[in-house]
Image (cartoon, rainbow, N blue to C red):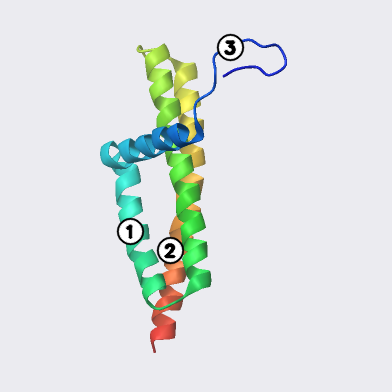
Amino acid sequence: MRNKFLGTGHQGFHPLRKMRIALSGARYAVLHDFAVAYKVVLSAVILLWCFWYRQWVDFSIVFLATGMMMVAEIFNTTIEALCDFLEPKENEKIGIIKDIAAAAAGISILVWGIVLFLESLSFWHNMR
């Protein structure tokens, strides 16, 4: 990316190209990382229910929780891939880094699961 003040570096990408690259990365994560894929499918089902029954607050809460979960999972996958690329052999420090990244993803998954559970309870309660 070009530094505006120093005049060094390469010219930045067009914003539409950046969006295409970001969507390509998200598609790759959903198609090739099962941890992301099944959570996206579960969230999509809950989101469709919320949308169908016009539960807009529930829809927005589930949507935000799903976004947070996807960001954490993608960061976890990225950190693990970088660690494996930098140190292909067994390394105790790399293991600690991977464990910390997995803990961050685990916390987001716990929050996501609680949100989905509470939303499904409120959905069934409102159906009566």
Mark closest to the chain's N terminus, 3 or 1: 3
Residue labelled with disc 3: 9
In the depicted view, which residue is nearer to us: 78 or 52? 52
Instruction: State the SS at label 2.
Output: helix
Give the residue drawn at x 53%, y 71%.
57
For badge 3, the amino acid type reads Gly
Q: Which residue is at a point 40% across and 36% down the rendered structure image?
A: 20
Residue type (three-letter) at the residue carrying disc 2: Leu
Q: Where is residue 47 shown, x and y percent of the image?
A: 39, 65
Q: What residue type is disc 1 on?
A: Leu
In the picture, which quadrant includes the N terminus?
top right
Q: Nearer the viewer, mark 3 or mark 2?
A: 3
Mark 3 or mark 2: name the one nearer the start of the chain: 3
Residue wearing tag 1: 42
Mark pair 3, 1: CA separation: 43 Å
The residue nearer to you, when weighing 44 against 82, is 44
In the displayed structure image, the side of residue 27 where residue 10 appears, left or right:
right
Label pair 1/2, CB-CB below 8 angstroms? yes
Q: Is residue 116 above or below residue 98?
A: below
Give the crowd class for mark 1: few <14, some 14-19, many >=20 residues within 10 Å: few
